[in-house]
Amino acid sequence: MAKEKILVVDDEEDILELLRFNFTREGYEVFMAGSGEKALQIARGKSPDLIVLDLMLPGIDGLDVTRYLKNDEKTSHIPIVMLTAKGEEADVVTGLELGADDYIAKPFSPRVLIARVRAALRRNSVREKAGDDSVIRIHDLVIHPGRHEALLKGVPVELTFTEFGILNYLARRPGWVFTRSQIVDAVKGEDYPVTDRSVDVQVVGLRKKLGSAGNYIETVRGVGYRFRE
């Protein structure tokens, strides 16, 4: 089985070396880039399975790198885990809306980052294998996208169009963090004027209807929501 390839992008040499050492030890093939320009070159030439991307880079910064990669058919499928400094909440939201898959704040634990990377790779593999109409089963919760139906312990849960759309969108990618505007763009409810603020109202109602299963939907402070893995 071929090694999975990870591109690490950071302008700090010690962080590059730290991540190269840890990812190599875990069995990954590692490419390194110290600038956004180099990152784009390697991503297009080597087709890595995942990119760990620092947002603060000289020249082309991490957000622009994300934008370029997600707008290119050859690289748009590559998961991106952002490295951010504390206090970069707005950049985290922007990065996620551009298409990044996850983030971790500096200073970080290499073990935690590796766990996040494994999870992102696993999610991407599942996403590529599963169609959008595949049934989702999470403990006692079963979601049938084609039938627009959610069952909890075998009992149908009465959800509005928008509530079902939010549940299906989050549950299809457990562990991924989604901003409110991403949820709005994905759902575009027909029964309710979906806005960033109304997403919070919808989630409150959705949690209430799901009972104990409502705990699967986690609030990510300052960013949005995710479905617990």
Image: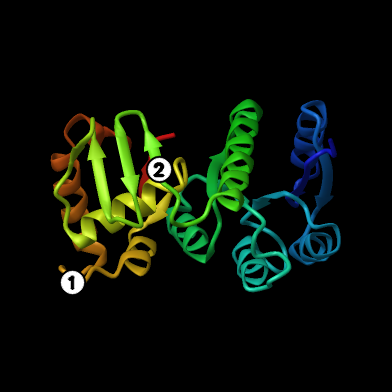
Measured from the top left, where is residue 96 in percent x and y?
Answer: 49, 58
List the residue tagged with mark 1.
193
User: Considering depth in this image, is 100 or 149 the residue closer to the camera?
Assistant: 149
Residue closest to the eye, 190 or 11: 190
Residue 216 placed where, x, y %? 31, 35
Q: Which of marks 1 and 2 is nearer the N terminus?
A: 2
Mark 1 Cα shell of 10 Å, populated few (<14), some (14-19), many (≥20): few
Question: Which quadrant holds the C terminus?
Answer: top left
Quadrant assignment, res 151: top left
* Count of numbered marks: 2
Q: Is residue 223 visible?
A: no
Amino acid type at circle 2 is: Ile
Residue under the point 21% across and 61% down: 161
Residue visible at 48% across and 55% down in the picture: 92
Report if residue 209 is visible in the image: yes
* Residue at mark 1 to residue at mark 2: CA–CA distance: 26 Å
Where is mark 2, residue-wise? Answer: 136
The x, y position of residue 105, in whole percent, is: 53, 41
The amino acid type found where label 1 is placed reads Pro
